[in-house]
């Protein structure tokens, strides 16, 4: 998959100081040791321009907007904005429940151990806050708009799961794969092949980011849904509305 991806075609915003890309799913932000022969966003960025620096990361399976600095001054400024929680991000997540949520604040401390396993821990965890709203409600599913005030590893995934709303296909935190036959009465399934899930990764997309550039201008960048996420939503619109 990654061999067919051209970094330049991922760019959704560019200025003198920053590039924003729409990251595809299944590509890690940084190079992973176990992924022999695979690529990463940082590798693709450096091949495009050796001076580029990632301002933040997304999980391997998460798609959506990523901000990249073009120079050390822009990187330092953005690091301060992230540290001071001045960068606003919105993620769209799909859960296998029909729920109406309005400005739910999930404030649960998260702890990451040496093996990058994350858990809720009041004693050892760092403060972590996510604001969750229903974006679109279906019969059996809901698209949630999640705004992470802090930026902990797996924060949205764990905070949603803590509300008994694990993300679709996020098996690490209790989510399950879902199939078209769950919402459509007649689905043509081959006797020799198992039915494929409606999405083959946990359903999370980094939809929007807001930040201030070096001239003091507010910048908002939106990343359209990745193809697999878009297809999933279209199936919900057609069969679960």
Image (tube, rainbow, N blue to C red):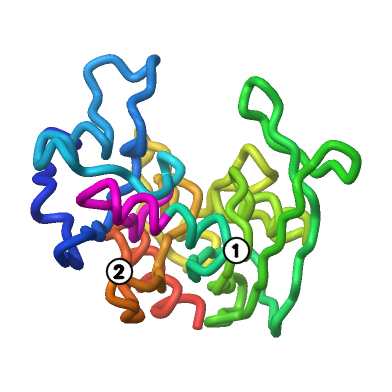
**Of 134 and 12, the residue lying toward us:** 12
Instruction: Assign a secondary structure to mark 1.
Output: strand
- As rendered, which of 78 and 102 lies closer to the eye? 78
Q: Is residue 82 left or right of residue 119?
A: left
Q: Say few, some or many: other residues with alpha carbon within 10 Å of mark 1 (under 14 / 14 to 19 / 20 or more).
A: many
Residue 91 picture location, percent across and down = 49, 66
Quickly name the residue at label 2: 214
**Left or right: 54 in relation to 12:** right
| Magenta span | 62-78
Residue at 31%, 38% (x, y): give it: 27
Q: x%, y% of residue 68? A: 28, 52
Image point (75%, 38%), residue name: 111
Name the spot of residue 182 as percent of width and height, x first.
Answer: 55, 61
**Which residue is at the far right?**
123
- In percent of width and height, residue 35 lies at 34, 19
Q: Check if residue 76 falls in the magenta segment.
A: yes
Q: Tag 2: Cα neighbours inside 10 Å, few (<14), some, or many (≥20)?
A: some
Determine which residue is flagged by label 1: 148
The tag earlier along the polypeptide, 1 or 2, is 1
Q: Is the residue 121 above or below the residue 75 in the image?
A: above
Residue 212 image-quadrant placement:
bottom left
The relative height of residue 19 versus residue 54 in the rendered view (above or below) is below
Q: Is residue 206 left or right of residue 146?
A: left
In the picture, the disc for residue 105 is none
**Vertical relation: 204 (above or below) 185:** above
């Amino acid at each position: 998959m990654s061999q067919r991806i051209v970094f330049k075609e991922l760019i959704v915003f560019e200025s003198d100081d920053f590039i924003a890309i729409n990251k595809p799913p299944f590509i890690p932000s940084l190079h992973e040791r176990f992924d022999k022969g695979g690529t990463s966003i940082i590798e693709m960025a450096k091949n495009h321009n050796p001076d580029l620096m990632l301002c933040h990361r997304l999980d391997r399976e998460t798609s959506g907007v990523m901000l990249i600095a073009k120079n050390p001054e822009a990187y330092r400024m953005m690091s301060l904005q992230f540290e001071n929680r001045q960068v606003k991000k919105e993620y769209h997540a799909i859960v296998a429940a029909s729920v109406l949520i309005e400005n739910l604040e999930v404030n649960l401390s998260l702890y990451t151990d040496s093996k990058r396993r994350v858990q809720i821990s009041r004693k050892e965890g760092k403060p972590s806050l996510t604001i969750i709203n229903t974006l679109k409600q279906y019969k059996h599913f809901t698209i949630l708009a999640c705004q992470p005030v802090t930026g902990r590893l797996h924060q949205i995934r764990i905070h949603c799961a803590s509300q008994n709303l694990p993300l679709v296909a996020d098996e690490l935190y209790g989510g399950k794969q879902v199939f078209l036959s769950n919402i459509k009465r007649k689905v043509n399934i081959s006797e020799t092949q198992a039915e494929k899930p409606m999405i083959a990764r946990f359903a999370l997309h980094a939809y929007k980011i807001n930040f201030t550039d070096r001239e003091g201008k507010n910048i908002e960048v939106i990343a359209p849904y990745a193809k697999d996420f878009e297809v999933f939503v279209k199936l919900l619109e057609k069969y679960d509305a």
